[in-house]
Image (tube, grey):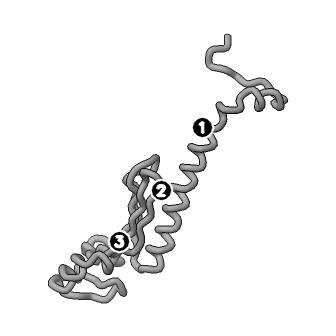
Amino acid sequence: MSQLFYDRAGLPIEMMEWSALMSMDEYRVVAQDQFDDIGVSTVWLGLCGPWWGVPLIFETMIFGGAFAQHQWRYATEQQAIAGHQYACGLVAGELRMQTELANVGENEDDQRDGCEHEHNSPDAT
């Protein structure tokens, strides 16, 4: 039978040890960040099916926003931390874009005065 359970170092462990570690938030949670109503969570899963090949025992997932339910899996904690930072960058970029788009309409007259080309409007004929 293939190995299914691994600790955070990627070393094989028995199911009972995995179960005990899984119940400990300080062991299971690698990183969590909140951006307004969007969450980014990276956790140790410690579980790997034999069909995955390399044990992918960590997971990052985004909750909310344009990237909701996007997830990535990793073999090492170092990869998981880098992946978490990447996911946080995606969310931060999304929020910056939302802010910039929200501000576009506020200064619409000022922006049109400096524009050197015509805008096509859907209602223009």
Residue occupying the point 18% across, 79% down = 19
Give the spatial CA distance, label 3 vs label 1. 33 Å
Q: Secondary structure at mark 3?
A: strand
Q: Is residue 49 above or below residue 106?
A: below
Give the quarter of the figure containing the C terminus: top right
Whether residue 2 is visible to the viewer of this picture, yes or no, is no
Q: Secondary structure at mark 1?
A: helix
Circle 3 residue = 43
Circle 2 residue = 35
Q: Is residue 86 above or below residue 70?
A: below
Tell me which amino acid carries mark 3: Val
Tell me which amino acid carries mark 2: Phe
Residue occupying the point 64% across, 38% down = 103
Tell me which amino acid carries mark 1: Ala
Residues tagged 1 and 2 counted as in contact (Cβ below 8 A): no
Corner quadrant of residue 27: bottom left
Specify which label sits upstream in the sequence, 3 or 2. Answer: 2
Residue occupying the point 54% across, 49% down = 95
Residues tagged 3 and 1 counted as in contact (Cβ below 8 A): no
Circle 1 residue = 102
Image position, residue 24 (x, y; %)? 25, 78
- In this view, the residue in front, 43 or 79, is 43
- In this view, the residue in front, 94 or 53, is 94
